[in-house]
Amino acid sequence: MRDTSRFAELVESSAGPITVTKNGYSKFVVMRSEDYDRMEAELARARLMGRIALAERERNDGLAKDAFESLASIEAKYGL
């Protein structure tokens, strides 16, 4: 690529990611940094919500234990 400033303008003005191809095959995707940051935040939120949902299912299924009871059990078991 010889005209990087033109390419940067294209990326900045784009409403979404731009796929760069070589010989007809996708090589990489370019997007504005603020779009990437937003996407990363959305993915992190989705992962967090998934973990919360799993924890709630485990609690509802009786798989969760009280932290203080668990610590007391460990202390008693190992004489701590």
Image (cartoon, rainbow, N blue to C red):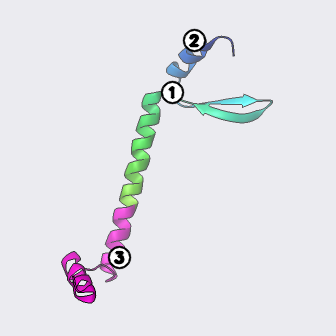
Q: Which residue is mark 3?
A: 58
SS of the residue under disc 1: loop
Q: Which residue is mark 1?
A: 15
- Work out whether mark 1 precedes mark 2 in sequence or the reverse, and give the earlier one: 2
Asked if the magenta segment contains residue 75, the reply would be yes
Q: Residue furthest right?
A: 23
Asked if the magenta segment contains residue 69, the reply would be yes
Instruction: Classify residue 27 as left or right of residue 9.
Output: right
SS of the residue under disc 3: helix
Name the mark nearer the viewer: 1 or 3: 3
Amino acid carrying label 2: it is Ser
Front position in the image: 27 or 16 = 27
Amino acid carrying label 1: it is Ala
Q: Residue at left 32%, top 71%?
A: 56
Instruction: Classify residue 1 as left or right of residue 72.
Output: right
Disc 1, disc 2: CB below 8 Å? Answer: no
Q: Quadrant of the C terminus?
A: bottom left
Q: Residue at left 59%, top 12%?
A: 6
User: Label 2 crowding class (10 Å Cα cut-off): few <14, some 14-19, many 20+?
Assistant: few
User: Label 3 crowding class (10 Å Cα cut-off): few <14, some 14-19, many 20+?
Assistant: few
* Above or below 31: residue 2: above
| Rendered image: mark on residue 5 | 2
Expressed as whole percent of the image width and height from the top left, the position of residue 66 reads 22, 78
* Above or below 20: residue 77: below
User: Label 1 crowding class (10 Å Cα cut-off): few <14, some 14-19, many 20+?
Assistant: few
Name the mark nearer the viewer: 1 or 2: 2
| Numbered range of the magenta stretch | 51-80
